[in-house]
Image (cartoon, rainbow, N blue to C red):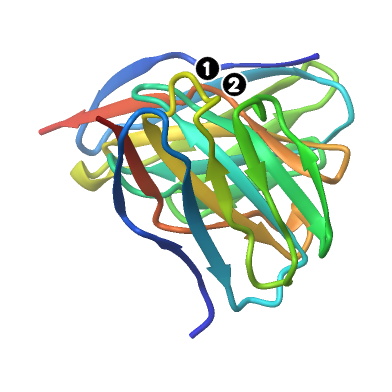
Amino acid sequence: GQNIDQPTEMTATEGAIVQINCTYQTSGFNGLFWYQQHAGEAPTFLSYNVLDGLEEKGRFSSFLSRSKGYSYLLLKELQMKDSASYLCASSVDFQKLVFGTGTRLLVSP
Amino acid sequence: DGGITQSPKYLFRKEGQNVTLSCEQNLNHDAMYWYRQDPGQGLRLIYYSQIVNDFQKGDIAEGYSVSREKKESFPLTVTSAQKNPTAFYLCASALRTLDGYTFGSGTRLTVV
């Protein structure tokens, strides 16, 4: 079976740091993706982890622990434009992505 | 510029009618995907295709059909058998899954 869990909603303040967690139980796991989706728009790629550890890309970092079935997305120096949904997705059998329900992040001034 | 195009952006359908959503890519990607997104929900996989003339059912294929006659095109038909078709439909493509997807801008289908 495939199961991916994320918090439904989070709030944070401009300039702060926020961590969005994702736990997964997926057979045929190959890697973990994070996407950003603004309301009414298509998702855009943020990061990808296949090995354990931290991947850093500017203000965004993503961490993976395969043994724990756990990942997180870290957003630093939050900006108002970061208000969006963040989707965690597991690559399965090198064929497809299985998505979680997404975390809606609201950044306030 | 390469990309993936979905049309139309908004679509209205009467109950009982079939409707086809278009998805075209010029990225030379082998794999193409159709997802459905309901309000406040994540993406659920309808169908996917790794190669021309071959496709597989996703988690919610009932009431939908696809074809993959050309590498560039992967149209989705929403049939009258789909009981709750109102949703946001997203098409995506990838060279390989581990390269990540490129998404189209989506089609919002409303049944009236």
Q: What residue is pinned by disc 2? A: A22
Quarter holding the N terminus of chain A?
top right
The single residue placed furthest to the front in the displayed view is B16
Q: Residue at x 40, y 14 (%)?
A: A8
Q: Residue at x 60, y 78 (%)?
A: B26
Relative image position of residue A102 (x, y in whole percent): 46, 26
The local crowd at label 2, few if under 14, some if 14 to 19, many if 20 or more residues have their Cα within 10 Å, is: many
Residue A90's quadrant in the figure? Answer: top right
- 3D distance between C-alphas at marks 1 and 2: 5 Å
User: Are labels 1 and 2 on one chain?
Assistant: yes
Residue A21: mark: none
Along the line of sight, the residue nearer the viewer: B17 or B45: B17
Along the line of sight, the residue nearer the viewer: A80 or A59: A80
Above or below residue B91? Residue B39 is: above
Relative image position of residue B3 (x, y in whole percent): 51, 73
In the displayed structure image, the side of residue A34 where residue B30 appears, left or right: right
Q: Chain of mark 2?
A: A
The amino acid type of the residue labelled 2 equals: Cys
The amino acid type of the residue labelled 1 equals: Gln
Residue A6: mark: 1
| CB contact under 8 Å: marks 1 and 2 | yes
In the displayed structure image, the side of residue A90 where residue B51 appears, left or right: right
Relative image position of residue B81 (x, y in whole percent): 55, 25
Does dot 2 land on a helix, a strand or a loop?
Answer: strand
Along the line of sight, the residue nearer the viewer: B46 or A106: B46
The single residue placed furthest to the left in the displayed view is A109
The local crowd at label 1, few if under 14, some if 14 to 19, many if 20 or more residues have their Cα within 10 Å, is: many
Above or below residue A64? Residue A58 is: below
